[in-house]
Amino acid sequence: MYDVREWRHVFKLDPNKEIDDQLLERVCESGTDAIIVGGSDGVTLDNVLELMVRVRRYPLPCVLEISSLEMVTPGFDLYFIPTVLNTKRAEWITGLHAAAMKEYGELMNPDELVVEGYCIANPECKAAKLTGATEKPDTEDITAYARLAGHLWKLPVFYLEYSGTYGDIKAVKKAGDLLAETRTTYFYGGGIRTAEQAKEIGQHADVVVVGNAVYDSPEEALKTVTAVKNSV
C-alpha cells in the first residue's frame, strides 16, 4: 500500500482535458511520485476510466480525487476524499461523504481511502464556486484550518488549494511550520508554472501538486519534479 507521507511531488491530471500519449508518457516517467486524476467540472465516469487506463501503463501510483459520486470506479490505488474546511455548505464537509459510504461503503477498502482537509484559498476558482468556499482566507484563517486538520481532526492530508493563482508564501510557510509538528501530510496546489516556484513551495509543503502547467507549459511543468525533490 502506498504511503503519501513518502511523496514530494505529484501531477494532477484533469479527465476533462486532452493530453496526448507522448506527453502522458513523459509525465508518468518524469520521476513524480504519483498521478492524481481529478477535476471540478466536466468529469464523467467515461473520461475518468479512459485516463485511468492510460496512466495504468506506467509503474506509479494512480489516485482518484473524488468530486462527485458519479466518477467513483474501482481500479485506482488510492481514493482521495476532500472535505472542504472553509465552506458553510455541509454537503462538502460530511454530506456527500455519508452518501458515498451509504452507497459504496461495503465495497470500499478502508486502506485505500485518504481524507483530505481542503482549504480553498482562491474564491474565484471553479472548486470554490462548486463547494461554496467563496470567502478568501487570510494567513490566520489558513493557519487555523491547518491546525484544525493536523491538531484537532488529525487528518492524513491537509491540502492548501490556490487553484490557478500562486499562493501567499507567508501563509504557505506558516501552515507548513505548524503541520511539521503533526502526522498530517501537507499538500500544496495552485499556480505553479515554473521550476523556481515549485522549489520555493517545496521548501514549506510536504507534497507539491502541479496541474494546469502540464497543459499550458509542459516543458516547464516537467522541470518541477527535480526542482521539488532538490528543495530543502
Image (cartoon, rainbow, N blue to C red):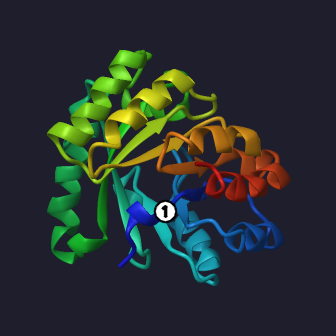
**Vertical order, 228 against 24 (above or below):** above
Q: What amino acid type is highlighted by mark number 1?
A: Trp
**Which residue reaches farthest front?**
232
Residue located at (53% from left, 58% from top): 8
**In which quarter of the view is residue 167 placed?**
top right
Nearer-the-camera pick, 117 or 98: 117
Where does label 1 land, which residue?
7
- Can residue 31 be seen here? The reply is yes
**Vertical order, 198 against 79 (above or below):** above
Tell me where residue 152 appears, x and y as whole percent: 15, 38
Q: Is residue 67 left or right of residue 33?
A: left
Q: Is disc 1 placed on a helix, strand or loop?
A: loop
Dividing the image into 4 quarters, which one contains the N terminus? bottom left
**In which quarter of the view is residue 4 placed?**
bottom left
**In which quarter of the view is residue 105 placed?**
bottom left
Circle 1 Cα neighbour tier, 10 Å, few/some/many (<14 / 14–19 / ≥20)? some
- Can residue 85 be seen here? The reply is no
Nearer-the-camera pick, 46 or 4: 4
Residue located at (54% from left, 44% from top): 41
Residue located at (35% from left, 43% from top): 180
**Vertical order, 11 against 142 (above or below):** below
Tell me where residue 103 appears, x and y as whole percent: 20, 64
Residue located at (29% from left, 65% from top): 113
Tell me where residue 201 appears, x and y as whole percent: 59, 39
> How many marks on residues?
1
Q: Is residue 18 left or right of residue 37?
A: right
Tell me where residue 130 appears, x and y as whole percent: 43, 33
**Vertical order, 74 against 4 (above or below):** below
